[in-house]
Image (cartoon, helix red, strand yellow):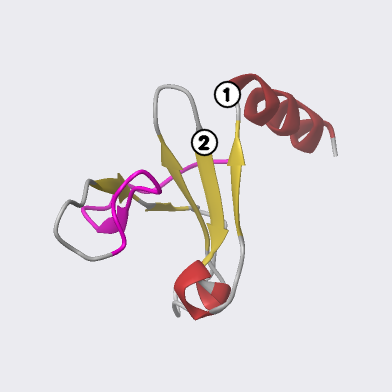
């Protein structure tokens, strides 16, 4: 899967932060849209990479609106890409 560069950052609060809003650790992910996604913005597969995790989401069903996101180990992501390339 080819990934287009993006400067979009999505911030989220760490689960280790307190709930009262005073002591929050926020983390930013830079999401990148797949080159196989449509250009109209409605059907996008996006990934964000970190050293130990590859995050995957569907932009039309964002987690903050009730959708799901996957968090995969890099080895699992590599295995998926190998499998997808064969298809």
Task: Give the left or right position of residue 1, taking residue 20 as reference.
Answer: right
Residue shown at the point (47%, 23%) measured from the top left: 52
Q: Is residue 38 above or below residue 32?
A: below
How crowded pointer 1 is (Cα within 10 Å; few <14, some 14-19, many 20+) is rated as some
Relative to residue 78, is residue 24 depicted above or below? below
The x and y percentages for residue 87 are 85, 39
Q: Quadrant of residue 86?
A: top right
Is 55 above or below relative to 74?
below
> Residue at image x 50%, y 80%?
65
The residue lying toward the viewer, choosing from 52 and 85, is 52
Q: Is residue 28 left or right of residue 46?
A: left
Q: Nearer the viewer, residue 15 or 49?
A: 15
* Disc ID at residue 32: none
The residue pinned by badge 2 equals: 54
Label 1 vs label 2: CA separation? Answer: 6 Å
SS category of the residue bearing label 1: helix
Chief SS of the magenta region:
loop
**First in sequence: mark 1 vs mark 2:** 2
Is residue 18 located in the magenta-colored stretch of the structure? yes
Q: Disc 1 designates what residue?
A: 74
For label 2, the crowd category at 10 Å Cα-Cα, with few meaning under 14, some 14 to 19 and many 20 or more, is some
Which residue lies at the image location 40% right of the left edge and 22% below the top edge? 51
The x, y position of residue 32, in whole percent, is 39, 50
Position of residue 67 relative to residue 7, above or below, is below
Residue 25 is situated, as x and y percent measured from the top left of the image, at 22, 46
For the record, the magenta segment spans 1-19
| Quadrant (top left, top right, bottom left, bottom right) of the N terminus | top right
Q: Residue at x 57, y 75 (%)?
A: 61
Name the element at disc 2: strand
Q: Position of residue 66 (x, y in %)?
A: 57, 77
Q: Say if mark 1 contacts mark 2, CB within 8 Å.
A: yes
In the rendered structure, does residue 59 fall within the stretch colored magenta? no
């Amino acid at each position: 899967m080819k990934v287009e560069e993006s400067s979009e950052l999505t911030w989220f609060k760490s689960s280790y932060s307190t709930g009262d809003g005073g002591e929050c650790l926020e983390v930013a992910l830079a999401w990148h849209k797949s080159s196989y996604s449509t250009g109209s913005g409605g059907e996008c597969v996006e990934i964000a990479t970190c050293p130990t995790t590859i995050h995957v989401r569907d932009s039309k069903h964002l987690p903050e609106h009730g959708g799901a996101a996957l968090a995969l180990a890099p080895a699992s992501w590599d295995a998926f890409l190998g499998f997808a390339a064969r298809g």
